[in-house]
Amino acid sequence: MPLAVIPTPIGNLEDITLRALRYLREADIVACEDTRRTGRLLAHYEIRKDLIPYHEHNEDRLAEELAERAETGRVALVSDAGMPLVSDPGYRLVVACIERGVDVEVLPGPSAPVTALVASGLPAEAVVFLGFPPRKGKERTELLARIAGEPSTFVLFESPHRLAKTLGDLTSGAPVAVCRELTKLHEEVFRGTVAEAGEHFSEGVKGEVVLVVRGGTATEESSLEETVEQARKYVAEGESPSRAAARAARESGRKKGEVYDRLAGS
């Protein structure tokens, strides 16, 4: 275990594996974003370790030092919550270890983007994780255009005070899930259209937020007609209109109701 990359709970302290706890106990040092937060986690499981702050402000300086220590000792890397490196520090340390020939072992475990994706009810075949979207400028404009035009499922982090703006910038009819405070006491998963989500959270939102958005809605009407046409083919093959609409909707990521209504009216 020269370098062990260990995911930690995203909210509920019970969401940690036995293997992760064993590796934390066996580590010589634990590199973490916030020693207080990691300290509370370790104290909960009665683990005492030397904690080294490792975050975005010092990882350039500490990556080589920690990689060197991993050559002769056991270093554990954790972030405040979830999988390190995923919108969190750790990339430079992993690269430094690889360049030195140090083994890097990644443990599976909690991940907010994956949890939100599964909870969203949106297609999970083609998925794009975007982290936090740019706040303004050309990069933001290009990102929003990509979401509107690409038929993938997009997963984004967003801060509570910027949620309304991001929802306002997305295509209003796009299917979305707003996942708030995942695994915590006040967990909420709102599923609907972007416009419905904007109305639901019009008075503000508290806690950590993950957005899951169905992309490709810039050509929504033509996409709907293509889905309905596929449903017609299933009907021609002998399926009932209801089953044909449900099958075509599931394959395209659209709602069964809109497909069935268009199919029944044609």
Image: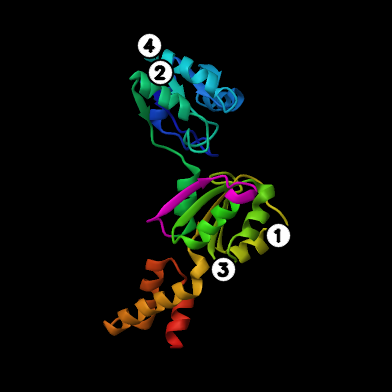
Q: CA distance from mark 1 to mark 4?
A: 54 Å
Quick one: label 2 or label 4, which is nearer the N terminus? 2
Q: CA distance from mark 3 to mark 2?
A: 51 Å
Look at the numbered disc 1 and give the secondary structure of its residue: loop
Look at the numbered disc 4 and give the secondary structure of its residue: helix
Q: CA distance from mark 3 to mark 1?
A: 17 Å
Quick one: label 1 or label 2, which is nearer the N terminus? 2
Write down the residue under mark 3.
173
Query: Which kind of residue does numbered mark 3 sit on?
Result: Gly
Q: Nearer the viewer, mark 2 or mark 4?
A: 4
Residue 240 against residue 183 in the figure, above or below: below
Camera-side residue of 179 and 226: 226
Residue 63 on the magenta span: no
Q: Say whether marks 3 and 4 touch (CB < 8 Å).
A: no
Task: For residue 46, say whether it is visible.
Answer: no
Task: For residue 147, say whether it is visible.
Answer: yes
Which residue does the image show at 32% across and 83% down from the upper left?
Answer: 235
Look at the numbered disc 2 and give the secondary structure of its residue: helix
Q: Left or right: 85 with respect to 55?
A: left
Write down the residue under mark 2.
26
Write down the residue under mark 1.
202
Which residue does the image show at 47% across and 47% down from the upper left?
Answer: 129
Q: Nearer the viewer, mark 1 or mark 4?
A: 4
**Within 10 Å of the Cα at label 2, are there few (<14), some (14-19), or many (20+) other Cα atoms?**
some
**Which residues make up the magenta segment?**
123-139
